[in-house]
Amino acid sequence: MSEWSGTIIRCFAERGIRLVTYVPDKVLIPLIDGFRSLPNVTAFSATREEEAVGIAAGASLGGTPSAVMMQSSGFGNVPNALASLVVPYQLPVALVISERGVLGEFNAVQIPISRVIRPALDALGIPHITLEREDEVEFLVTRSLHQAHRTQQPAALILSPRLTGGKMEG
Amino acid sequence: MDAAGTDARTKAAGKVMSRLDLTRRLVGRLTHGEIVVAGIGNANFDLFAAGHRPENFYMLGSMSLAVPIALGVALAQPSRRVVAVEGDGSMLMNLGALATVAMVAPPNLTVIVWDNGTYQITGGQAAATAEATDLVAVARGAGIVQSAWARDEAEFERLVGEALAGRGPRFIGAIVNQEPGAGRPERDPVLVKDRFMRGISAKGSTPG
């Protein structure tokens, strides 16, 4: 397991996140496999990203801290689920977004939505942080999750290719 | 389709019922702190009209997410029964959620869909369910083996009773008329959340 993914999984576990739902993505593999291997975490795929947000919102309402993982292209599916559920109901759901469309992208259709993510999160009032350096992962993730929990707001963690290596053609 | 059985739809024999009456029948059977997640619009209007319960969650937006929300709640609250009540238009928007429910197979989850064949709240425009789509067949095809149409009120009560006593997941479809939703829950999302979480003991008096 890569160091960044192990750190994220540990920080999530320490925060008590016990439900993780996702639409798969290659960069997310170490996180998906890592969460699925934990006996006290329920981790499974959803068919669409907004469905994953709904499941995580339900878990949060039921008292189980939760997270959603998606690729940046999938973020395009979630604004209404965030705008009319997670944000107004003040649910501390963690969003993990692996970033395509930057730093060596080979597929033109990935690029426009990658430019939408941060302005959309800003417009929704959802705090977001981009994880770029291994040595900052623990601090940024721990503080983001803590703030989400204490202020009852979602938090978005964007995984930069600077951290993950991203997805290259091939 | 001819009368010789080439029509595989199973909903054809159903009686057209009252959503409010069926909602009251459902609520009347909830005696063990069962959770109800009601979809946007008339599903939650009638749930509220049937008498507010602390274990009710009212969606004010996020059309199509009643089933995913209920799935998340069911996983977080395994000792409680969870019922999602959703309209057919909303269900059509997110059929994949039925596949996820089947895959995860929460034993404490039941999905009830009120099918009036229309997008009633936006003016009664026809939905795919009016002529083409059998949501019980869709649910069964998605892998929710225990899926059935309630063909009349007595069968609805029997199916609900079985769902609340037996192992899920289950899917119940009911054909309903065009009566407008009878009540309106308060449109205050934080109030709805707080009341719900305290109602199911998911939130105490101190932040944890």
Image (cartoon, coloured by chain):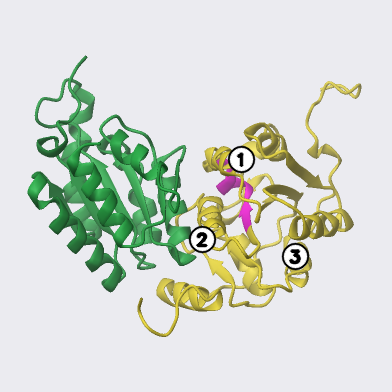
Chain colours: A green, B yellow
The C terminus of chain A lies in quadrant: top left
Q: Check disc 2 and give the amino acid type.
A: Ala
Q: Is residue A76 visible?
A: no
Please state the extent of the stretch shown in magenta in the rendering.
B84-92
Query: Distance between the Cα atoms at labels 1 and 2?
Result: 17 Å
What chain is tagged by disc 3? B
Residue at 23% across, 25% down: A109
Q: Is residue B153 left or right of residue A5?
A: right
Query: Distance between the Cα atoms at labels 3 and 2?
Result: 22 Å
Query: Distance between the Cα atoms at labels 1 and 3?
Result: 23 Å
Give the mark, 1 or 2, whose residue is nearer the N terminus: 2
The residue under label 1 is B102
- Callout in the foreground (1, 2): 2
Picture disc at residue B76: 2
The residue under label 3 is B26
Q: Check disc 1 and give the amino acid type.
A: Ala
Asked if residue A105 is positioned above or below residue A89 in the image, the reply reads: above
Q: Check disc 3 and give the amino acid type.
A: Leu
